[in-house]
Amino acid sequence: VQLVESGGGLVQPGGSLRLSCSASGSIFRIYEMGWYRQAPGKQRELVASITSGDDSDYADSVKGRFTISRDNPKNTVYLQMNSLKPEDTAVYYCKANLKVTIILGRNDYWGQGTQVTVSS
């Protein structure tokens, strides 16, 4: 199983970016998907998560600015980030909780991360 993120980059404060993460490989079913971020010198933190039924949850710091969504047939999760602030600067990681077969249990898989820099 491989998760590949895209869409990071440099943006000015107040700008927008859209991150994408696609899962590929031997996948039976994907359950929860989420976005995490890690800034230099800080612990990785949850930004937003979404269930297979489209129930979503957000960190307080991004509520009203970020929107998570997913395309189940494409095994893809998105993060629309608006009104970006310098404190949003971090490496953003995608995580998927999934089964590779109907028999085996659920496990977490991570992407390699994509850099988001908010600066003027």
Image (tube, helix red, strand yellow):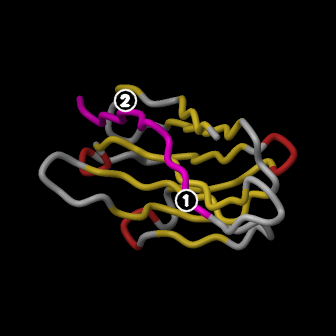
At 45% from the left edge and 30% from the top edge, which residue is drawn?
8
Q: Residues within 10 Å of mark 2 (few under 14, many from 20)?
A: some
| Number of the label disc, if any, that sits on residue 12 | none
Residue with the most extreme front position: 103
- Going by the numbered disc 2, the residue's amino acid type is Val
Residue at 57% x, 65% y: name it: 49
Q: Residue at x 51, y 48 (%)?
A: 94
* Secondary structure character of the magenta stretch overall: strand
Q: Position of residue 119 (x, y in %)?
A: 24, 33
Whether residue 66 is visible, yes or no, is yes
Q: Where is residue 78 in the image (x, y as percent from the top left)?
A: 63, 45
Please determine whether, in this image, residue 49 is positioned above or below residue 1.
Answer: below
According to the picture, the residue beneath numbered tag 2 turns out to be: 11
- Write down the region rendered in magenta: 107-120
Q: Is residue 10 left or right of residue 95?
A: left
- Give the number of the disc on residue 108: 1
Element marked by disc 1: strand
Task: From the viewer's perspective, tell me whether residue 84 is left or right of residue 94.
Answer: left
Q: Could you tell me how far apart the alpha carbons at marks 2 and 1 are, in whole angstroms?
A: 30 Å
Question: What amino acid is found at the position of numbered circle 1 in the picture?
Answer: Asp
